Image (cartoon, rainbow, N blue to C red):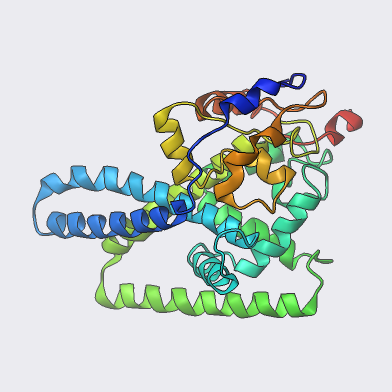
Amino acid sequence: MHSTAKDPSLTAHAEPWPCRTSFTWVAAGNYLTTALLAWAMYEYTSGRGAFLWLLIPLILISSHFMHAMLIAFHEAAHGNLRASKWHNEFDGQIVGMISLTPFTLYRALHQKHHVNLATEKDLELWPFVDPQQPLWWRRLAAFLELNFGFFYTPLLFWRVFLQRPSPVTNKTVRKRIWREAAGMVALWGTVLGLVAWFGVWEWWLVLYFIPAFIAGNMQSWRKYIEHVGLSGNTGRSATRSIIVETTPGRFLALSLLHQPLHGVHHVKSSIPYEELPDHVDLIEPQDEGDTVPFPNYRSAFADLLGRLRDPRVGRQWAAAE
């Protein structure tokens, strides 16, 4: 168990560099990388085979920025991405359509994740929160989500929305979700139709699908690092946070909108992402079982790997046993 008594020294190592423009830089990096990918792809298809070796790192960089855009989607769901409500909603809608998950659907179910964190009612962490789910199914679910997150994550949300009874009961909200789904189908029908018409599937794969597929897996691994394998039900005991102290780590945290400080977000979700580093005191362990922040993603990843053989989340597992 990665826990300890309260450690007042944590505030002395708070992650610096809170940046109010990090989303602007992330969005710009995403567009710039896509433009560079298009240029490298053009050179490669023109017979310059050496550009294949430029495509590979650019695809990985593009995947990172796409992953960051998914984090921006999460922040928009909390209303924390933009000061303007209209811009916040617009960005959330666009990213939602591109990532196959209606923004309103994600927001409705993600709110329940915060209210019911790591309990059997936490729909985002199902089936790992349910002691009735067999080990083989939890292992299979983890394998699918970690390796096919691009498809698994939208299906997870649609499964909950379409089940009977559905936790999304408000008729106005349900109608809005269906409208957004219709817009998503229209968008992708148009995009894929144009791709097929002009015969540019290889361009679509390189510029969108391959980076997006990798980004979906990055999103899943980050989600698991944040929660899976922990045995609490609070923001401090059911969440791994990372307080980085190296310069590369701080740049990484900036590019992920300070999401490594995920415990701060769960203790107080109204804090805008750029202010998370200013509230690191909120994740100082206070009770037995609270998780001590990790110094980097490597150590948090190693802690997760040791628990993936039996993926579970929440205090209810101890009660069930």
Place of residue 278 in the rendered image (x, y in percent of width and height, measured from the top left): 60, 40
Judge whether residue 140 can be spotted in this image: no
In the rendered structure, the answer to whether residue 143 lies left or right of residue 237 reads left
Viewer-side residue, 292 vs 194 = 292
Residue at the left extreme of this rendering:
47
Q: How many marks?
A: 0
Residue at left 55%, top 24%?
A: 295
**Relative to residue 76, is residue 267 depicted above or below?**
above
In the rendered structure, the answer to whether residue 1 lies left or right of residue 35 reads right
Residue at left 27%, top 61%?
A: 202
**Relative to residue 173, is residue 160 depicted above or below?**
above
Place of residue 163 in the rendered image (x, y in percent of width and height, measured from the top left): 77, 64
Q: Quadrant of the C terminus?
A: top right
Residue at left 23%, top 55%?
A: 36
Judge whether residue 170 can be spotted in this image: yes
Viewer-side residue, 321 vs 230 = 230
When asked about the image quadrant of residue 255, the answer is top left
Q: Quadrant of the N terminus?
A: top right
Viewer-side residue, 155 vs 111 = 111
In the rendered structure, the answer to whether residue 300 lies left or right of residue 58 reads right
Place of residue 319 in the rendered image (x, y in percent of width and height, measured from the top left): 91, 31
When asked about the image quadrant of residue 301, the answer is top right
Place of residue 173 in the rendered image (x, y in percent of width and height, measured from the top left): 73, 75
